[in-house]
Amino acid sequence: MLKSSADGSFSAYNEAFDECYHSLKDGALQESLYKHIIPAFSACENLQEITILDICFGLGYNTLTSLYYRQIHALPTRLVIYSPEIDHTLIHNLKNFPYPKEFDVLAIQKILTALTNTGTYQDINTYIEVRIIDACEYIHTITTHSIDVIYQDAFSPSKNPALWSKEFFTQLYRILRPNGILTTYSQSSSIRKNALACGFLVYDCTHKDKLVRSGSVMSKSALHLPHYHLKPYNKA
């Protein structure tokens, strides 16, 4: 079921999880851009290639907004994006989804057709792989210290607790590179404590212009993000 969000972009309601894919108050595109993509690209601005784990693919906003951000800023960065998604039907229906006009700069139908048919899309500066698999299973197949960016954007802890457990965050910590970053919309103290217990540095992350509500970013080394106020979270 389509849901209109505050910035004019569309999200959708998932009956199985009884939840929308995005914050309707922040806006689907705005949430993706300001809670995930801009923090991630800021942290990785010196990399020629960024390897991203997008949990989970869902409507594809984080993956597609990553491509959009690179395009509008004319970045030479090669993007390698891996994403699990448990809903096979969803992927096949995305070709008809009303994405925001901002995505018109992308070859979006070509990308979605390739992902639907083969599970992969690639061009000279892009590789995207979507696996129809449970993220809890998929995470164990990823090589240690191989990921620069993790978009931790699963359904909420109350709806999908397995993807917010200490066990899952242990695996996220394992696969993240020493200078990598994890972004998430969640501000839950229990989730932040799980992350701290696994070794992450945890920050409350607020855009300086307050264009969306705060989220969290996590890392293995100290972070500085130019467009954000970062407040360390240290509660045991």
Image: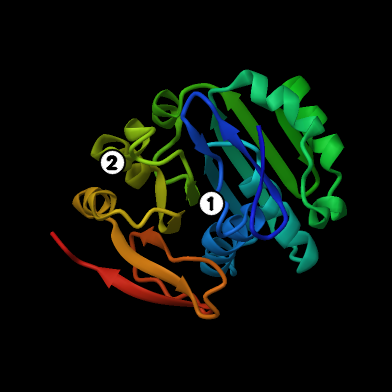
Q: Residues within 10 Å of mark 1 (few under 14, many from 20)?
A: some
Between the residue at mark 1 and the residue at mark 2, the CA separation in whole angstroms equals: 26 Å
Q: Residue at x 53, y 23 (%)?
A: 86
Query: Label for residue 226?
Result: none
Query: Label for residue 23?
Result: 1
Q: Residues within 10 Å of mark 2 (few under 14, many from 20)?
A: some
| On-image quarter of the N terminus | top right
Viewer-proximal residue, 204 or 67? 204
Image quarter of residue 2: top right
Describe residue 204's horizontal placement relative to residue 34 as left or right. left
Q: Earlier in the sequence, mark 1 or mark 2?
A: 1
Furthest toward the left, the residue is: 236
Image vertical order of residue 155 relative to residue 187, above or below: above
Residue marked by disc 2: 170
Image location (x, y in percent) of residue 170: 28, 41
Image location (x, y in percent) of residue 30: 63, 61
Q: Amino acid type of disc 1?
A: Ser
Q: Residue at x 78, y 51 (%)?
A: 100
